[in-house]
Amino acid sequence: MKSGLLVLLGTLALSLSSFAAPEHDFLAQKNILIQSQDPLQVFERTADNPKALFQRYKPKLDSGSKITSPLQVGGTQTHPTVKVSIRKCVAFICQTVDLDAEVTIREVSGSCKKNYAMYADLRRSSATLSDTYDRLDVTICYQQSKTNEAQLQLAAYAHRAPQYSGGVVQKEIMDFLQLQVQPITQALAETLRSNGSTAPLSQ
């Protein structure tokens, strides 16, 4: 049991290190279980169609924010676009932030059985967002421990834009991006279920 835990921790550390450079800010880490007669097929079918994932995505907001333009998911199956406008108020000052992202998922090299990376290009978003973070990066480590069971280890990072500077705005943007990791993970779990996983959604 100890050796298995050490292997898992070592694998996760290698996965995290791929985006742990100073130009990235860590957001969150999540795990998702896949249960199926062919877990790899379920995962690959899901990774091949990120649009289906984001069609299930529901943005999460804090108490000072509200959606002013509803979520729109367009583009192709492999390169979906995600658009939503959010009005954010801090200390009686309000501003509308337009999120306009193009998403890609591709296989990358790594130490896991399968290694993928999901990139959400934020450069077309409003300047408040794109001048702080120009990309959302998620590493996806696929590890299969049993014939009918596999684990996805996700680590999410915000990539700093060339104009990046710390401060109140940066903190608010980072808080918003951190809030999105949970609903994206939930949407991924739901998409895996639709592609054949029998694992419970609440893990």
Image (cartoon, helix red, strand yellow):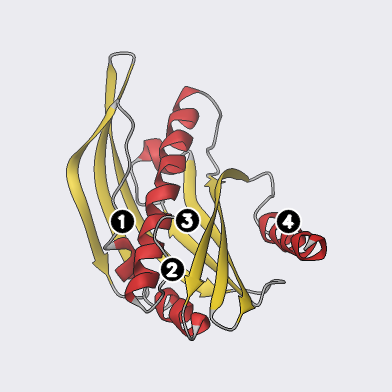
From the viewer's perspective, tell me whether residue 175 is left or right of residue 63.
right
Q: Which mark is residue 199?
A: 2
Q: Earlier in the sequence, mark 1 or mark 3?
A: 1
- Given residues 77 and 190, the one toward you in this image is 190
Mark 4–mark 2 distance (CA, rounded to whole Å): 25 Å
Which residue: 18% across, 48% down? 70
State which tag comes first along the sequence, 4 or 1.
4
Q: Residue furthest top?
A: 91
Q: Which residue is mark 3?
A: 203
Where residue 57 appears, as percent x and y from the top left, is 31, 56
Residue located at (71% from left, 55% from top): 17
Where in the figure is residue 55, as x and y percent of width and height?
26, 63
Kindly report which numbered mark, 4 or 2, lies closer to the viewer in this rendering: 2
Which residue lies under the disc numbered 4?
13
Disc on the earlier residue, 4 or 2: 4
Q: Position of residue 124 (x, y in %)?
A: 35, 52
Q: Is residue 158 above or below residue 52?
A: above
Instruction: Give the amino acid at mark 3.
Output: Gln
Q: Is residue 162 left or right of residue 134?
A: right
Is residue 79 visible in the rendered image? The answer is: no
Q: Which residue type carries mark 4?
A: Ala
